Image (cartoon, rainbow, N blue to C red):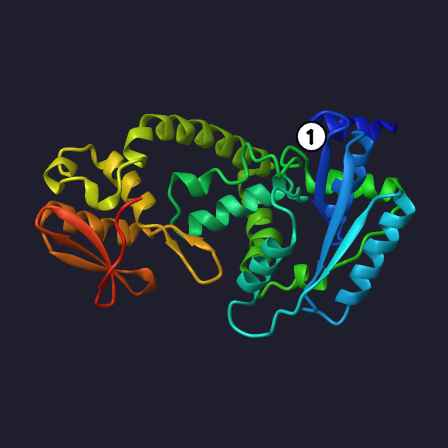
Amino acid sequence: MKESAERLLEACAFPLAGSEVTIAVSGGPDSVGLLLLALAAKLEVSVHHVDHHARPTSGDDAHYVRELCRQLGVPCVIHDVDVAPGANFEARARAERRRVIPARSMTGHTMDDLAETVLLNMMRGAGIDGLSPMVNDPTKPLIGVRRKDLHEYVNDEDVHPRHDESNDDVAFLRNRVRHELLPLMCEMARRDVVPLLARQADAVFEERAWLDELGAADADRALGDVDCRELREWPRARLRRWLRAKLLDVDELAEQHPPSGAEVERALTVVVGDVVATELSGGRRLARRGQRLALEDGSTTLTIHG
């Protein structure tokens, strides 16, 4: 095994050799690098590729992945799906990927992806959960690996992955974070900030896990099960975390949307009795009936148990 592969494998979080895994491979350098490293780790690999027909070259990507897997002797499944252009294209494409690719399939997200996601979540006003994405996630075995090192490894293996031109388009916020914000932060800090953001995510995850353990009993209590007079006695941090979990919205694409910080603050005013109801995302309404909370959708009260 090459020294470059050994060095990268030390930073990976793969299961034991011989384990069966499925990998989502787009044909780009990150997912191709994941595939090569998984084989170097002696895992039993099968590949899944989704062709969304989102770009004129997407069929070429599917052909490339199929041919690469043939050369490597890896089983490959190509999922051909149609995602119509228009609003929420990325969310609808994600929903299609989730539908066709086996659950717990590995993806080629690196430490750089983690850092970008932390910054994106910060800009969206995410809470503690949003500041520790991908950590301790078995589907993200490469978050200890730098993107640049991964791409160099792929090149050293004389493999030529596909290039997705949309990754260069700064009309997408993630690409602006990648190509503009992170380089500026590194320049201002006079150091590479990506490992700093990754270490922060690790630390936040540990605190988040501890809070989840402390709040395990709270998690089992449904929105309408707790008297508001009791809720008003809770520490504000405990109450905010409970409300964020109970006011989670799931859209028609099965995407989960935690309430914004502003929505949680408005929900607190309902709990303390300043107002009797407040509007939430997704056309929902949180109301207090007596001393109990209820979620309403238009004129219909939603189920508040579970």
186 sits left or right of 215 in the view: right
Please provide percent x and percent y for residue 136. 55, 32
> Mark 1: few, some, or many residues within 10 Å (few <14, many ≥20)?
many
Please tell me in which quadrant of the rendered image residue 196 appears: top right
Report the quarter where the N terminus lies: top right
Please provide percent x and percent y for residue 242. 28, 40
Q: Name the residue under label 1.
A: 14
Q: Give amino acid for label 1.
A: Phe
Position above or below: 170 against 291: below
Residue displayed at 12% across by 45% down? 272
Query: Mark 1 falls on what kind of element?
Result: loop
**How many marks overall?**
1
Please tell me in which quadrant of the rendered image residue 109 appears: top right
33 sits left or right of 104 in the view: right
**Observer-nearest of 17 and 167:** 17
Position above or below: 215 against 283: above
Is residue 186 visible in this depiction of the protein? no
Residue displayed at 9% across by 49% down? 273
Residue displayed at 46% across by 31% down? 205
Please tell me in which quadrant of the rendered image residue 57 appears: bottom right
Report the quarter where the C terminus lies: top left
5 sits left or right of 249 in the view: right
Position above or below: 7 against 148: above
Please provide percent x and percent y for residue 25. 73, 50
**Observer-nearest of 85 and 260:** 85
**Observer-nearest of 124 and 65:** 65
